[in-house]
Image (cartoon, grey):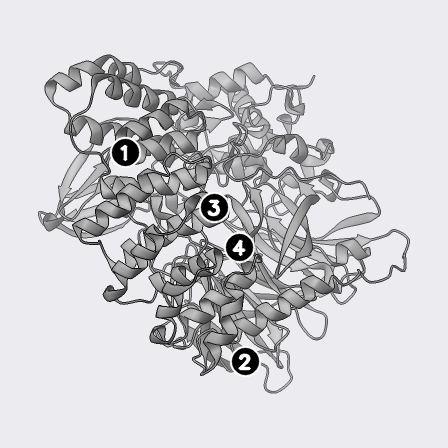
Amino acid sequence: MNRRPLRIPTPFQRPAPLLRGIALIAMATIALAQPNLTEVTREPDAYDNWKLALSPGVATDPAAITVPANFKIELLRSATPDEDSWVSMAFDPQGRLTVAREKKGLLRMTLGTGNVEKVEVINDTLLECRGLLYAGGALYANANNSKVFCRLRDTDGDGRFEQFEELLRTEGGVGHGRNHVKLGPDGMLYLTHGNNVVVNPDTAADSPLRNFQDDRLIPCPWDPQMFDGDVKLPAGHILRGDLDGKKWTVIAGGLRNPLDVAFNEDGEIFTFDADMEWDTGTPWYRPNRVNHIISGADYGWRRGTSKWPEYFPDCGPTVLNIGLASPTGVEFGTRSNFPAEMRRALFISDWSYGRIIAVHLQPRGGGYTATAEHFIVGKPLNVTDLAFGPDRAMYFVTGGRHTQSGLYRVSYTGPQVTQPPAPVDEKSAEARALRKQLESLHGHRMPDAVDRIWPHLGSEDPWIRHAARIALESQDVAAWQSRALAEKEPLTCLTALLALTRTAAADARQPLLGTLNALSFAALNEEQQILAARDYQLALIRIGAPEPALAEACVQRLDALYPAKSWRVNHLLCELLAYFKAPEFREKTIALLSQSTRSEDLLHYLFYLRLTPGEWQPDQLRTVFAAINHAETLEGARDYQRSLKMIRTELLEKLTPAQKDIVAPLVAAAAQPAGTPASSGPQIFVREWKPEALLPLLDRVGKGRSFESGRKAFATAQCVLCHRIGQAGGLTGPDLTAVASRFNRRDLLDSVLNPSRVIDEKFRNLIFTLKTNVLAAGTIEREDEKTVVIRTSPLLPQTTTLQKADILKREPSPVSPMPPGLLNVLTEQQILDLIAYLESGGDPKHRDFSP
């Protein structure tokens, strides 16, 4: 097969300056693209076939989709307007395909040789079924907007579902909501929920995941104003239940928005979890990632700045960072007739970049490592779900956000090669078996459990160590607290203390911190130093602040280690010493700040320097404010830039007039940065453009357009003030660099003409109704216990402060912040050049500009 290796950025590796636009003009999300990603996603060269994708009711032509050698792709059906957009799929026992419509109801498709022979509506009540599963003679559906997981039965064999049973009702939002359902090899149901879903209070008390908290040492006042304000722990999570829905356990959480899970041949669970693209460039940014779901794991998703980095020892394991994407359906190739390597691959769907990625897992100890490659790439190819059919071919559907849907089949056409099964890695198999033995103790107390657990707390295998720690936390702390404090082997001691910080009472504070202070840090490796620093943090978070003498001992111990050789250890120590207000913290951290080049380091040190009390020296102030200015020139998305502005504001509020004079030139320089995007000045009305006038012209976008004219039109229509393409443009609205990977020209034009038709929740204004019956609308800039500060226009710096006591209610606005009529200042040719410019992602070499 012709391989296209997928370049995966390592944690904190800065991506290239191409930002992804998930939705249309006012509907997208912001993120930074991976190195050379657009070069890969532009591999499909069949742009002469785009006309098929531009017509209403026709999905992207297969000729414009790249598949590996010896594979064939077919478009079996394009959704008609009355069939809506498609979000999930499942094969029934008769080999027919059930497809969920985005708005309401289910379709049943009878497949022919190369087409769909019959389509019928089999449900017209369930709202947005993101998860479908046939099992136990029934159809299970996770209906997101209905907020219900249900079982449908055909009791009389007529092909209709007469019986409806509600098995689980959940509260919370529907954005990152009720997603897929899978049948595990244990015969149990596995529900995948995003971080807007509230865990049902009836979930079992013996759930492996139950002892969760935010667990960040210094709360950030900005976090309440961050996106997803209704998120409650454990955030995104995986539920396990029986086929009758009688008992549900939370097996793992701390996820953002995993759409699906899949089981490999070892019975292990994997998911593809989402990032928060606004965080790109920050130290708390977490890329889209493939996670190995293990019992009791907390994957650290929190609101705002409180997200856990993946190196936290109490954070669940990341198998592979994918970078920028929008995760949707996932499936192993086990039931396919693909070559052996592909049968063992995990196929993950990326809605935003229009691709399906093959992830190749390799056992390592009690877990896995992985590599990845592109399997299918198209433009647009907004994949929502995939499955393997009775013929062992891959089927997938496109759609979502009311876009054009299609059903595709991918078949292997190469020679059938009989290959022996992959050799069994006996050491890894034994390690996984041991891990599962320890996991059987999660949530259960057993008389001899501590002795069984203890030898594995110091395992070099982090998956086994994690399983042992969660098992230990499930036991009576009185049975093992003294043993943890007396343990001499460093790794065993540190792991046991991690468990103790999460379960002990206040009387453990002094002996626990004393044990940590007595450790010989010079003898610890980086992993152990990270574990020790996290133990300090959790002891302070969970058990409370120590008395002054013990606090002073901790400061002396930690200050002697700072700065360390490892940036990870330095990040942890920085937070600890800021918490203790250590005397030398400012001086040492400014020294680190002055040596930093990565945006993540600059923002991290600035974030904690803003908290330091006492007098500032003039040179220190100049260094800090110059660092803020420099950080603002680096690549980073909305919350990165916003955080830098908040830091500058907080610091200025604490300065004396004389100190403000010292930094005044640096503050003035920041107020007028070079290269600030601007529109083209006063606009001249051309005409009021309607869809019927422009849609017939879209086939003229394909070639011969002017890049320079499109770039100027982007400014003339004032798009540049809010939106970025490549490195040019603003950050208050969604980035549009990769918008054409999901949406065809027709949908793109419609989004400009009708910006309020679909609005991404991250870019939706809020409407505040005041007691005086006055309405105020805008986005939240900051919020505290008494006030809400809103920005009424993304184009103006002015803000409005509302008193919470005066607010009757707040609700999402149905009107997009993007005004209609932006195209009315452009000519016909300028509009076509603008569409080509958007389609190109800011690349002047794009084929739309060829003669």
Q: Is residue 39 found left or right of 655 in the rendered image? A: right
Looking at the rendered image, the quarter that the C terminus falls into is: top right
- Dots 2, 1 in contact, CB < 8 A: no
Under circle 3, the secondary element is helix
Q: Residue at x 42, y 26 (%)?
A: 596
- Disc nearer the start of the sequence (3/1): 3
- Say which residue label 2 marks: 243
Image quadrant holding the N terminus, namely: top right
Relative to 660, does residue 170 appear above or below in the rendering? below
Q: Nearer the viewer, mark 3 or mark 1?
A: 3
Mark 2 lies on a secondary structure that is: loop
Query: Quick check: can you spot residue 432?
Result: yes
Query: In terms of sequence position, does the residue under pointer 3 or pointer 4 come before the other?
Result: 4
Residue 848, x across and y down, in percent: 64, 24
Tell me the element at label 4: loop
- The numbered dot on residue 523 is 3
